[in-house]
Image (spheres, grey):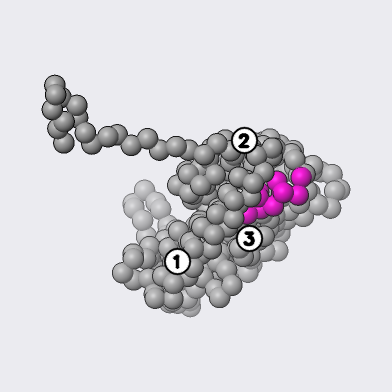
Amino acid sequence: MITKDITDIQKYAKVSSSFTYALLSPELSDVADNQIAKAISLEEYAILDAYTGLDVIVKQAIEFIKKAEINLALFNYMAVGGLQITKGGISVLTPKDQEPAEKVDKRDALRLYKKKGYKAIDNVLALFDKNEDKFTSWKTSEQYTKFKDVLVNNTAEFQEHYNIFNSRQTFIHLVPELKIVEQQYLIPGVTLATLKELKTSISVDPIFTEVKNLVSKAAVLYTVSKNLGSGLFYQSSNGFELRFDILDYERNFTNAKEISTHLIKQRKEKKNEAKEFLKTALKTIKENPILFSYTELTVTRATPFINGKGVVAI
């Protein structure tokens, strides 16, 4: 594990002098395997775990990972930390002259550990994004490449069109919706062939760049429209971000009846904005056939008439 000893734990969490590394070790291992390594790839995790160099950026990534591991491990530890498992069963430990924490205090602590842990993962991924050449195992891993098949394929580009507070994890959670938006709106709007061109072409023609930007805006705003008020995100007046502090039992995936009038209006506005950007892009595509291999789809309707022997039947 990248978190090596009690000194690391004391650096990023407030624990008592009697708290030991061994107490948290099982939870640290679980977080390392099931959260950190899955976010950055097993290969990159192993490289950072064994790193002994002096590169400032790499060392910063390691510190972010320690912070994430420790806080998320404490989040998990709180469920079992007061329990003692023996051959006689499970008992609750209550140290002498100490009172158990109130339910509200436990809840606030859980929120804090979870939020700090996930924010630290976000910081790791943001650092990776800005310094790809230093984290090559991550760059060639599925964790990186699985986002590259969508038009808007990184946090910075999504951020350019809508504020997600530069959160990589928010972007990651939105990628499945971006894929749906491409099937539902972009392909019918500009055709599959044109969308592939926008994804793969390295053209620097200003008209091509403009169209790509317009279609990207449409993709982002359609995605935003679909997710406003979903309960997964913290909503502010100028954007949204994945809710790092919400506990699992508190999740409320708001249904249509519970969404406020304001959110319904926002959803509609974003969808209309997306539609207009896509229409403008299509107009430009049609005006520049040399740049785009756009072919207008023709819809063939079956005739309602059935020809019989000398009789026309309907």
Residue indicated by mark 2: 293
Q: Amino acid at mark 1?
A: Lys
Magenta-tinted stretch: 205-215
**Residue 89 part of the magenta segment:** no
Q: CA distance from mark 1 to mark 2?
A: 31 Å
Front one among 95 and 177: 177
Cα separation between marks 3 and 2: 26 Å
Q: Main secondary structure of the magenta part?
A: helix
* Residue 121 picture quarter: bottom right
x and y, in percent, of residue 68 in the image = 62, 57
Task: Give neighbour class at mark 2: few <14, some 14-19, many 20+ (Cα, 10 Å).
Answer: some
Quarter the N terminus occupies: top right
Q: Nearer the viewer, residue 35 or 105?
A: 35
* Nearer the camera: disc 3 or disc 2: 2
Question: Where does residue 172 sit, x and y in percent of width and height?
Answer: 56, 51
**Which quadrant is home to the C terminus?**
top left
Taking the spot 19% from the left edge, 26% from the top edge, the residue there is 307
The answer to whether one can see residue 299 in this image is yes
Mark 3 or mark 1: name the one nearer the start of the chain. Answer: 3
Disc 3 to disc 1, C-alpha distance: 17 Å
Q: Amino acid at mark 2?
A: Ser
The image's mark for residue 121 is: none
In the rendered view, does 53 fall on the left or right side of 275? right
Query: Residue 268's mark?
Result: 1
* Residue pictured at 14% horizontal, 21% vertical: 309
Secondary structure, mark 2, is loop
Provide the secondary structure element on which disc 3 rests. helix
The local secondary structure at tag 1 comes to helix
Number of other residues with Cα within 10 Å of mark 3, as a class: few under 14, some 14 to 19, many 20 or more: some
Instruction: Name the residue carrying label 3.
Output: 161
In percent of the image, x 72 and y 49: which residue is there? Answer: 207
Mark toward the viewer: 3 or 1: 1
